[in-house]
């Protein structure tokens, strides 16, 4: 925070301000965990079961030659959420001027419209696998943890954005 500056304004509820740092911290932890937790389990003929993590799935897509899909999922499931949380934390720290804060948050807001793309893709994948009679797919904790991380980061981003707009 710049010297002499206060984050709290009359418009921002003190409870909301106290929520931002824990939300950013919890969201970061959930996001990290979601990369290593299985997000989908496929079962073929009741004998063959595979658990899929996000990072292993991206690697498998890449090794199978699905480069564009692997890049898209990597960008919107790994790189963007990490960059978003880092940027929001940087803005929240108060070590950046109001103009830069606003530009950063506007950029995040624009890209944020795509942040649930991968959850949507995974849901479609689960439905498609279930549609085939040879395999069954069930969502696993990693999918829910990832969705929770994204939702918490959206809430914290909105709180920081509201504060930045008021500071203008």
Image (cartoon, rainbow, N blue to C red):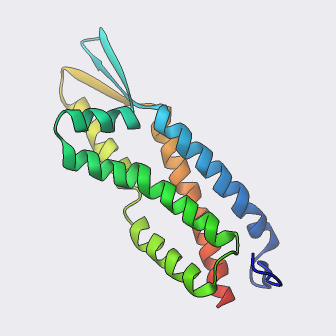
Q: Position of residue 134 (x, y in %)?
A: 19, 20
Q: Residue at x 42, y 49 (%)?
A: 78
Judge whether 114 appears above or below 62 on screen: below
**Rendering coords of residue 108 (x, y %):** 47, 70
**Which residue is the extreme one toward the top?**
47
Q: Nearer the viewer, residue 85 or 124?
A: 85
Q: Which quadrant of the figure has residue 7?
A: bottom right
Left or right for 50, reference 86? left
Indicate the quadrant containing the N terminus: top left, top right, bottom left or bottom right: bottom right
Task: In the displayed orientation, state which residue is furthest to the bottom.
Answer: 168
Q: Position of residue 133 (x, y in %)?
A: 18, 23
Quarter of the image that includes the C terminus: bottom right
Please state the horizontal and vertical placement of residue 19, each as a whole percent of the image. Answer: 73, 61
Lateral position of residue 98 relative to residue 125, left or right? right
Residue at the spot 22% in from the left edge and 33% down from the top edge: 63
**Quadrant of the rendered structure where residue 3 is?**
bottom right
Identify which residue is drawn at 34% across, 20% down.
50
Figure quadrant of residue 167: bottom right
Q: Nearer the viewer, residue 124 or 81?
A: 81
| Vertical comparison of 57 with 134: above or below | below
């Amino acid at each position: 925070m710049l010297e002499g500056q206060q984050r709290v304004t009359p418009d921002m509820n003190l409870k909301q301000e106290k929520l931002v740092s824990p939300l950013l911290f919890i969201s970061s932890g959930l996001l990290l965990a979601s990369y290593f937790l299985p997000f989908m389990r496929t079962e073929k003929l009741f004998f063959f079961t595979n658990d899929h993590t996000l990072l292993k799935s991206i690697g498998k897509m890449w090794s199978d030659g699905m480069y564009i899909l692997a890049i898209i999922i990597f960008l919107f499931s790994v790189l963007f959420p990490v960059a978003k949380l880092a940027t929001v934390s940087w803005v929240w720290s108060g070590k950046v001027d109001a103009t830069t804060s606003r530009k950063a948050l506007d950029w995040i807001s624009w890209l944020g419209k795509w942040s649930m793309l991968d959850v949507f893709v995974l849901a479609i994948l689960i439905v498609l696998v279930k549609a085939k009679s040879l395999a069954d797919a069930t969502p696993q904790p990693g999918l829910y943890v990832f969705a929770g991380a994204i939702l918490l980061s959206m809430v914290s981003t909105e709180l920081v954005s509201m504060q930045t707009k008021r500071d203008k």
